[in-house]
Amino acid sequence: MIKVDNILQLIGRTPMVRINKLADPEGAELWAKVEHLNPGGSVKDRIALRILDDYEREGLLKPGGTVVEATSGNMGVGLAMACAVRGYKAILVMFDKASTEKRRLAQALGAEVVICPADVAPDDPRSFYSVARRIAEETPGAVLANQYENPSNAQAHYDTTGPEIWEQMEGRIDALVASMGTCGTITGVARYLKEQNPDIKVWAADPYGSVFKTYKDTGEIIQGYPYLVEGIGEDKVPGILDIDLVDEIVNVSDKESFYMARQLALQEGILGGGSTGTVMKVAVEVAAAMRPDQVVVTLLPDTGERYLSKLYSDEWMREKGMLGQ
């Protein structure tokens, strides 16, 4: 029986679930760390709490202060939850492709939500990065969570997610498959796991339209283009990314991501978001190419309940030309 003083103490220690029907029986074992079972519904709860803890310890966040962040939604929900418990105001700057569910969740937790266009350059004054920085600078007593550049992001996963995976798998892991967005998860977890076993291969799943694969393959930062999957991929390279920890990056289309997310729900009973479909698509392929005595672990970032009006809506999927394989 679990008994805690507040909801934030339930963050982390998420379960590992074996993937059965989607996994190739002749391939490697496939396991998924189900991060939507964090109390805020996503992997971002971990870094929201860590960033607040670090700012408080450094004296940068005072009682009654304000936390500002640019977010695709999940980090915003995690921050709103943490700020509600700690007594801070949260101002969240989201782009306009964020699902209605994520906006309303953040508002239900007391956050103020500001909407910006998604189809502008990162340095455009209208981008959610620029607007968040401006609000933080102009608001007395405010701090910018700054998940894209804040080392607390990757450190949270190095200190918690990585050790949890290693312990849960009892050191039996040959490959990790994770998504890339702010890149805190893949950087922190990969660093920890490779310190335990340098032979572990790290695969990243990334949407077509994101800049990461080209950056990994050539070192160049190209101009990205729009895609529908939320919360992963980027049009810039975050400062916290250690690209040398990533062995391979595989691009996945929106259609492939949404189809796999739906199959995960139908065949494994796990309702994940579009990014969950993206990583599962790559994880299934990676595991199928490996031996039966090997083990692949993937991280499922968030819950599909945040996308009921999108990828789990036949009407929305039909409108986007996404129904069928």
Image: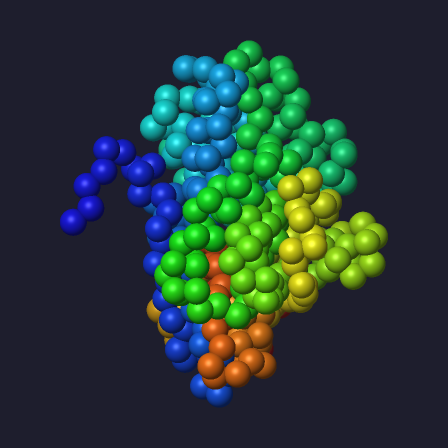
Query: From where the camera sits, is residue 81 visible?
Result: yes
Query: Residue at 50% across / 20% down in the picture?
Result: 58
Give the x, y percent position of residue 51.
49, 32
Residue 205 figure quarter: bottom right
**Which is nearer the eye, 206 or 219?**
219
**Which is nearer the eye, 14 or 295?**
295
Query: Residue at 60% across / 34% down in the picture?
Result: 150
Give the x, y percent position of residue 290.
56, 80
Q: In the figure, is residue 162 to the left or right of 168?
A: right
The image shows residue 137, relative to residue 312, as above or below, that is: above
Give the x, y percent position of residue 306.
44, 51
Q: Quadrant of the C terminus?
A: bottom right
Residue 20 figure quarter: bottom left
The image shows residue 40, relative to residue 307, as above or below, that is: above
**Which is nearer the eye, 10 or 195?**
195
Give the x, y percent position of residue 33.
42, 60
Query: From where the camera sits, is residue 266 visible?
Result: no
